[in-house]
Amino acid sequence: MTEPNGQGVDVTEVHGDEARDALDKVAGDASVAELGRELGIEPIEVLRSAKVERLPETLENFEEAAGKLYVSVTWVDNSERAVRTSHFVPSDGGTIDSNVAIVPKTSAEPVSFGKLGGSMTTVTEAEVQRAKQSVAAPDGFVDCLADCLGISAGFVTAVLAGCGLVCVISLGTGCIVCAAAAFGFSVGTVGGCFGGCAA
């Protein structure tokens, strides 16, 4: 199934053996196993509901993700916080690139996102206000995207700013994939929201 959206990112949802192979690679990753231990969740349990998408062969301003399989996973989503991961799985058997987002449900607490098992960015409300000035988005876009995805506008702003030049240059396909990875949502979902909010 190809899922085009208003921003021109055509992703194909992957099923069958190819999807199982990608999920097995993610489940076998040491940083994923460590996150599972920290959360008290068996990775294979949450991976059963993960979405696997094939990214386009070319991505504007984000070529390092082009052609890879993309896996988005929700580990926790309760009244206190959401923990989501995203994984870029190369088809050639190379190293998996994994990201994590830890999003508290209250705006008083900082949001953390970054490389799973690596460096994390923690964003406070003051930093979000500074970041708003560097995001090249139409008026109302950030709030619309936050509503569409069910996350805070502060987190949206921090991610768009964190994606750097990929999103400052334009809100194109590279920005959508970068943002989806940081948010931990599927590319199709984020692309659909981008398309609806940019209209």
Image (cartoon, rainbow, N blue to C red):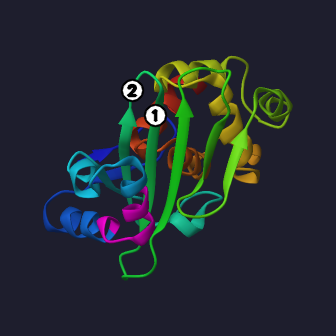
Q: Which residue is at 39% across, 47% downward? A: 39
Picture quadrant of residue 119:
bottom right
Picture quadrant of residue 125:
top right
Q: Which mark is residue 78?
A: 2
Q: Which mark is residue 97?
A: none
Please give left or right for residue 11 compared with residue 21 in the image.
right
* Amino acid of disc 2: Asn
Instruction: Report crowding for label 2: few under 14, some 14 to 19, many 20 or more residues within 10 A (C-alpha).
Output: few
Q: Is residue 54 above or below residue 189?
A: below
Q: Is residue 76 above or below residue 80?
A: below
* Amino acid of disc 1: Ala
Residue 20 % position (x, y): 19, 64
| Quadrant (top left, top right, bottom left, bottom right) of the C terminus | top right
Could you tell me if residue 143 is visible in this image? Answer: yes
Residue 161 % position (x, y): 74, 42
- Helix, strand or loop for the magenta stretch, by majority: helix
Cα gap from disc 1 to disc 2, whole angstroms: 6 Å
Q: Which residue is at 76% across, 52% downward? A: 165
The number of discs equals 2
Q: What stretch of residues is rendered in magenta?
A: 26-35
Residue at image mark 1: 82
Please give left or right for residue 70 compared with residue 174 in the image.
left
Residue 48 % position (x, y): 20, 50
Looking at the image, the residue that sits furthest to the left is: 16
Instruction: Report crowding for label 1: few under 14, some 14 to 19, many 20 or more residues within 10 A (C-alpha).
Output: some
Residue 5 % position (x, y): 42, 37
Please give left or right for residue 22 compared with residue 159 in the image.
left
Magenta segment includes 51: no
Residue contact at pointers 1 and 2, CB within 8 angstroms: yes
**Dot 2 lies on which element?**
loop
